[in-house]
Image (cartoon, helix red, strand yellow):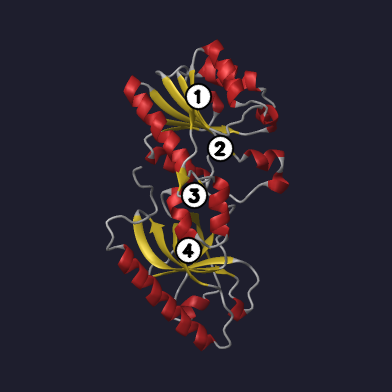
Amino acid sequence: MEIIRDSKDIPSRPRKPILTIGNFDGVHVGHQFIFRNVAQQADAVGGTSIAFTFEPHPLKILDPEHLPPRLTTANQKLDIMGQCGLDMAICVDFTREFSRLAPEEFVHEYLCKRLAVSEVFVGEGFAFGRDRTGSIATLRSLSQTCGFQVNVAAPVKLGPHRVSSTLVRQWVEEGRVDEAAPLLNRLYTLVGKVAQGASRGAALGFPTANLLPGEQLLPKRGVYAAYIGWRGMELRGVVNVGVAPTFAGEQVLVEAHLFDFHRDLYGETLEVGFVKRLRDERKFPQVEDLVAQIRRDAEDAQALFSSLEREPLRWGLRIRNL
C-alpha cells in the first residue's frame, strides 16, 4: 500500500478513485468492513482504493483535555489498512488551519479538484468539515457537483453489541481483552520500545522487557497472557500492567516476561497482543510469594496457549480475513 503523508504529495486524479474518509482509531471490524468494500469496488471497476485519514487525532489539536487514549498508533492504523487490501492511504496533517475548512471547501479541494473521486464510502455517523458541520446529507448534496457516488455502510454488530471505538476502549479499560478481540478482528496490541528497568525480574529468575507504550490505552491493571511480536516472530509470555506494589512502585509499567527467550531487547520495538487477563495485580507479603505466583501465572498462560493453538482459528497480532 502506498502511503501519502504530505498533502502536497497527493497524486493528481488517480485512476477511478474509490475513497473512504475517517480517523479510524482502533481500526475495528466496522472500519475493516468499509475498507474491504472500498478495495472490492476498486477492483471491480479497475480503480484505486484509498483511505483518507488524519494525524494526529483531531481532538489533540481542538480539545486536548478530552482526547481519549489511542487504541492504535499511526503506523499500526496504516498497517491494518494495508492488510485490508487498500491501494493507498492519504494521511493528512491535522492542523487548526485544516480544521477550519468548511465542508464545501474540503469536498471541492480534496475530493473533486485533487482526487476526482468516483465513489465515497462512509460510516453511518460520518461528519466532516469545520466544527463537524458536514453530514452525510451534506456530502450527498455536494457529490452532485463533482459527480461521485456516496455509499453509507451500515453499523456492524457482534451479537447485541454495535461495534465502535468507544466500546473497544471500554472493554480494554475493564480488562476484557479477550472480548475486545472479536471487535478488532485481532488482539488488542500495544506497540512500544523496550526501556531499561530495575532488573528485578531478572533477579527473581523472570527477566522482563519493560515497554514504553506512549499514547496508547493501557488495559486494566493486572496480569495477562500475551503474544509478543518482535522482528516478525510471534513469541509467548505473561505481561504485568501495573505499579509492582510488592516493591512499592508508583509508575504504571508494562512488563513482559517472554517464555524461552533470552536475548537483550533494550531499545527494540515490541508488539504486545493481550490474549486474556489472568488475575488482578496484587501486593505480596514476601518476595518468595510473588515468585511462586509468577510461576503459576506462567503455567496458566502456557496452558491457555496450548488450548488456543489446538483451535483452527485464533486471534493474533494481524487481522483475519473477514
Residue drawn at (38%, 67%) of the image:
263
The label number, if any, that marks residue 119 in the structure image? none
Kind of residue sitting beneath label 2: Asn
Gap between marks 1 and 2 measured at Cα: 18 Å
Gap between marks 3 and 2 measured at Cα: 25 Å
201 shown above or below 210: below
Position of residue 7 measured from the top left corner of the image (x, y, whole percent): 55, 26
Report whether 56 appears left or right of 291: right
Q: Nearer the viewer, mark 2 or mark 4?
A: 2
Is residue 198 at least partly visible in the picture? yes
The label number, if any, that marks residue 266 in the structure image? 4
- Residue marked by disc 1: 10
Q: Determine crowd level at label 3: few under 14, some 14-19, many 20+ residues with C-alpha closer than 10 A.
A: few
Kind of residue sitting beneath label 1: Ile
Kind of residue sitting beneath label 4: Tyr
Residue drawn at (60%, 80%) of the image:
247
Gap between marks 4 and 1 measured at Cα: 37 Å
- Residue marked by disc 3: 160
**Which of the marked residues, 1 or 2, is nearer the chain's N terminus?**
1
- Residue marked by disc 2: 23
Q: Nearer the viewer, mark 4 or mark 1?
A: 1
**Which of the marked residues, 3 or 2, is nearer the chain's N terminus?**
2
